[in-house]
Amino acid sequence: MNFLLTNDDGIYARGLSALYGELSQDAECLIVAPEAEQSAVGHAITLTRPLMVRRARKNGAFWGYAVSGTPADCVKVGIRELSQEPVDLVVSGINLGANVGINVIYSGTVSAATEGAILGVPAIAVSLDTRRDADFAFAARFARRMARFMLRENPLKNVPLNVNIPAVPEEEIKGVAVVKQGRARLMEIFERRTDPRDNIYYWLAGEPQLSEGEEEDTDMSRLQEGYITITPIYYDLTHYGALEKLRMSIGELKS
């Protein structure tokens, strides 16, 4: 089997290293990741400048390909150009910080998995719900279980899965919950600062918060309760419930 590993935290991120350590026990793993952090770039791709690719080394040995682009770029060039064999699975992560609620739209980690599905390859995105003092050991082991499930048991191989793992000791995890994406969002705070030349700039900060009336069976709700959450996601952004009403309303414009 051949896996393509990527992320949005950069090619030397600890989460990616932990992922490789586990998944390489089951498959040939090719790392194609951004040369620098690309958090919150969403599903952006590079069109107006060359996409530079270099061979990255770690501890004196070949580690993977560092790409001067986004996570979606990495998956595209990895599948189309860099992998010598067909890719059986795309795994994106392990992200430092959860990807839940509305913030999934901004996530480079999730977008990489989505790009894999667009190209016809099964894919998962894996995130750990912490931004400091991260221990990726259990998350990497669970990612390995998910990879096996994705290829052997999952009946919906064309649907990417968004996996979020609580940052608690393994024995404290309550279970695995298959849930829908919620409406939790980052409550933005812009810190106003001044540089040494008296130019004003703003630094975006804040923490994800549950929206008012958030349902129980959503990604952030269950994650906060101590469950690993798995959400099937898709790139079709059509609001099907609004189609017929809109057709009727637009039809009235002709009269």
Image (spheres, rainbow, N blue to C red):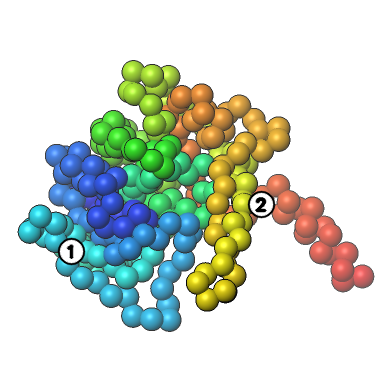
Drawn side of residue 246 relative to residue 215, left or right: right
Q: Quadrant of residue 84?
A: bottom left
Q: Residue furthest right?
A: 255
User: How far is disc 1 from disc 2 in space, using C-alphas?
Assistant: 42 Å
Residue 56: mark in rendering: 1
Residue 140: mark in rendering: none
Residue at image x 51%, y 49%? 104
Expressed as whole percent of the image width and height from the top left, the position of residue 206 reads 57, 47
Relative to 65, residue 189 above or below: above
Residue at image x 42%, y 19%? 174
Disc nearer the start of the sequence (1/2): 1
Give the residue at mark 2: 239
- For label 1, the SS is strand
Amino acid at pointer 2: His
Residue at image x 45%, y 41%? 98
Residue at image x 57%, y 74%? 199
Drawn side of residue 23 relative to residue 49, left or right: left
Expressed as whole percent of the image width and height from the top left, the position of residue 189 reads 62, 52
- For label 2, the SS is loop
Expressed as whole percent of the image width and height from the top left, the position of residue 198 reads 57, 74
Looking at the rendered structure, the number of numbered marks drawn on it comes to: 2
Q: Label 2 crowding class (10 Å Cα cut-off): few <14, some 14-19, many 20+? A: few
Is residue 191 or residue 253 the one in the foreground? 191
Is residue 99 or residue 118 the one in the foreground? 99
* Quadrant (top left/top right/bottom left/bottom right) for the C terminus: bottom right
Expressed as whole percent of the image width and height from the top left, the position of residue 1 reads 18, 47
Amino acid at pointer 1: Ala
